[in-house]
Every structure is written in C-alpha cells, then in structure tokens.
Image (cartoon, rainbow, N blue to C red):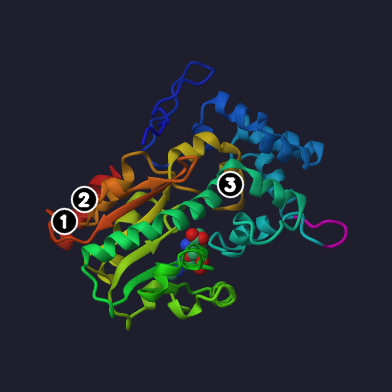
Amino acid sequence: MGEAAIKLSVKKEDGKLMPRGRAGTKNFMDVPMELRLKDFESESGEFFISILPPEIARCFKQAIMETGIESEDALKYLEYALSMEENGKPISPIAQWVHDNPYNPRVFKYLYGEAEPLSPMDKGYTLTTGSQAICLRLKSLIKRLPNIIRDECQRFEMKSDEKYVIYNIGASFGLDTIYMMAENLDLRGFVKIVNIDPDEASLVYGRNLAEKLGVVECFQFVPKKIEEVKDLDKAHMLLFIGMFCPVPTKKCVLTLNFIKKFIHEKGIVIFSTVQEKMLLGGPILDFIMWSYGWRMYFKTDKEPARIVAFAGLTHEKDMDWEDEFGYNRMTVARNVKHSVFKKVGDVARLVRILMM
Ligand SMILES: C[S@@+](CC[C@H](N)C(=O)[O-])C[C@H]1O[C@@H](n2cnc3c(N)ncnc32)[C@H](O)[C@@H]1O
C-alpha cells in the first residue's frame, strides 16, 4: 500500500524525543512540524484560516502548531465554532452537530456533496483534504463494489432465482449502495440490499432517493442498531463503512467478531478504516475533530489485517483497496472456518496482546 507511517519517536525542536505511542492512536501533535505547516499553506488550509476572525485564527494556528488540544487557544476556537452569528444562525452547524453527537449522519450530506454547506466555516470543513477523502471513499465504493458482487455470485454459484444479500450496517443514507444499484442495471435482478441504521431520518432520505432513481424494490430499510437485529437471514456481504474511524483497534476486533455471525460461511465483510496517511496529510481536520469531541483512531498500515486475523476471519488481501488519496482503506475479510483462534477466550487473549 506504500503508506507513509508516522515515526514512533519524533525529535522535537528542543532535541527531546516525543513519547513512543501505541500504534493507531496518533493525533495532530504527533505530525511533524513541516507537515502541519504544509497543511496551513495548502489551498484548503488558507481558506479555513481566511474565514476565521484574526484573533481566532491566531489561536487556531497556535493550538495546532504548539499548545495542543488542552489549551486556552483550543478552547477559544471551540467557543467560536459553537457560537451564533448576530442573525441567530450558528457559525458552524457542522460543529454543533458533531459536538452533540459524533455519529450525526447529517454531516455526511455535506461531505458527500448532497447539499451545499450552510456557512463559510462548514464550507471550509468540507474542503479539508480529510473531508474530500470521505467523498472519494464513497466514489470508490460505487466503482468497486459491482465487480466484487459479480465475482462473489460466481463463487457462490448462485441460481437464477437466488438473491445475493448485502447488509449495509450503519448505512446512514446508504448512498454507496443506492448509487451503485442506479448505475448498474444488471445487478437489479439478483441483488438485495438491507440498509440498517438506527437513524430513521437518514433511512427515509435514502428510501426517497432510491425511489427517485427507480431502485427502491432492491432495498429493505431496517431502523435499528445492529445489536437489536434478530430476525434477518444471513448475508453474503456485510458493508461496515465509516464505522471504525473513531474506534480503537481492540474494539474493532470485538465488533467484527460480533458482526461476523450475520455472514454466510464463505461470505465477506468489507470494512473501512482511516489510515495514518490521513493524519499526516490533514492535521488541521484532526484538530477540528478533536476540538468538537470526535477523536479519530487512525490505523497503521498493519492494523486492518490484524483486526481481521484477531476476529477469526481470513484476509482477502488482494481484494483490498484505498480511496484515491490513500486515506481510507477498505479491507475485505472472508468468513472461512480456518482460524487458529477458535475459542472466545483466544479472542480475548489476543485482544489483550493487541493492547500492549
Ligand atoms: C459515520 S456514519 C457512516 C455512514 C455510512 N456508512 C457512510 O459510509 O456514509 C455512522 C452511521 O452509523 C450509525 N450507527 C451508529 N451506531 C450504530 C449501530 N449500533 N448499529 C447500526 N448503525 C449504527 C449512525 O446512525 C450513522 O448513520
């Protein structure tokens, strides 16, 4: 994958080494100074600074370059981001939504270009490289999934009256599956997609879009958390996209181990992770997310494969892919009973090893 890894120990300006952090838990303060500066000098960095009042812009830069997340500077930025304009409108609706609920799916409407940002600050947010990469992730899924589905149907030797079943867990609007079905007429006859998400408003948005695009009959919408889903048959494919971004690696293992019960034997799960390359390319967005209370867990190059192995699945390495920037990794794992980690105790022990 050729991903640039963050050095585990970095020399600071005073000559001391920064602490050697565990893999996958880095933040903007671990990013070398020159890369932080580079982000400020990029078009999106300059735009973001230009829309902040001068004093807030100074605090914002100071927090990212020097004083960190637990500083007065960071607090001043946060207070501004959560404040109202004179006309009573929020300076940044996105800041408010993320601050209230990091999983708020409304934000994604703007990241995916489904709607125009509601304020200059929100526009600045959608222009950061990390935000752009989320949109590239969606595009890569729409492009890549159809061929994976066709190949998998052959592998399963599906009969003409059988359906290839996909659960899109944490689907939100389900734009990936809906646009994919709209653009691939041949899939409509044999693919059934179940979009699962507790956020009913997102599912309704998706249903309306699917209706508009003439593919709604291929979909089922389940307004539940995956833990509450009991009465569905098994799926040939699970999509778990955008779900592991803020999740520590050990919890990813436990979650994957839990959701694998929804996959047929030999079926696959495709999950996405945000990789350290995203942090190196976009420390400004990491600071913004931290200050709103949404801390990302950027994964190292090796972590997605470890998550698969420790969850007792088989890594289909050749099927993995990344978005165009290499910030989001899509990892493909197959439910094959081969694993050396057979017992629940084994998984727990391995999770402990992973934490060390
Ligand atoms: C970051 S969004 C990802 C959305 C979508 N997969 C995408 O790629 O745009 C996370 C979604 O997970 C949903 N979610 C949160 N907890 C969930 C759970 N326990 N089961 C299913 N969905 C959940 C949220 O409502 C939200 O829509």
What's the magenta bit mostly, secondary-structure-wise?
Answer: loop
The location of residue 297, given as percent across then percent down, is 44, 47
Q: Is residue 65 visible?
A: yes
Mark 3 burial class by Cα count in 10 Å: few <14, some 14-19, many 20+ = some
Q: Nearer the viewer, residue 65 or 225?
A: 225
Q: Nearer the viewer, residue 309 or 335?
A: 335
Q: Is residue 285 above or below residue 205?
A: above
Magenta stretch containing residue 84, yes or no?
yes
Which labelled disc corresponds to residue 132? Answer: 3
Query: In which quarter of the view is residue 299 placed?
Result: top left
The answer to which of marks 3 and 2 sits earlier in the sequence is 3
Q: Is residue 235 above or below residue 252?
A: below
Question: Please, what is the three-letter code of the amino acid marked with disc 3?
Answer: Gln
Q: Nearer the viewer, residue 247 or 118?
A: 118
Mark 1 burial class by Cα count in 10 Å: few <14, some 14-19, many 20+ = some
Which labelled disc corresponds to residue 346? Answer: 1
- In the rendered image, the residue lying farthest to the bottom is 231
Residue range corresponding to the magenta coloring: 83-88
Magenta stretch containing residue 101, yes or no?
no
The answer to which of marks 3 and 1 sits earlier in the sequence is 3
Question: Please, what is the three-letter code of the amino acid marked with disc 1?
Answer: Asp
Q: Is residue 1 above or below residue 221?
A: above
Badge 3 marks a residue whose secondary structure is helix
Badge 2 marks a residue whose secondary structure is helix
Instruction: Tell me the residue that label 2 is attached to.
Output: 350
Q: Is residue 257 visible?
A: no
Image quarter where the N terminus lies is: top left
CA gap between label 3 and label 2 equals 35 Å
Q: Which of the two marks, 3 or 1, is nearer to us in this view?
A: 3
Badge 1 marks a residue whose secondary structure is helix
Q: Which of the two marks, 3 or 2, is nearer to us in this view?
A: 3
The location of residue 259, given as percent across then percent down, is 31, 66
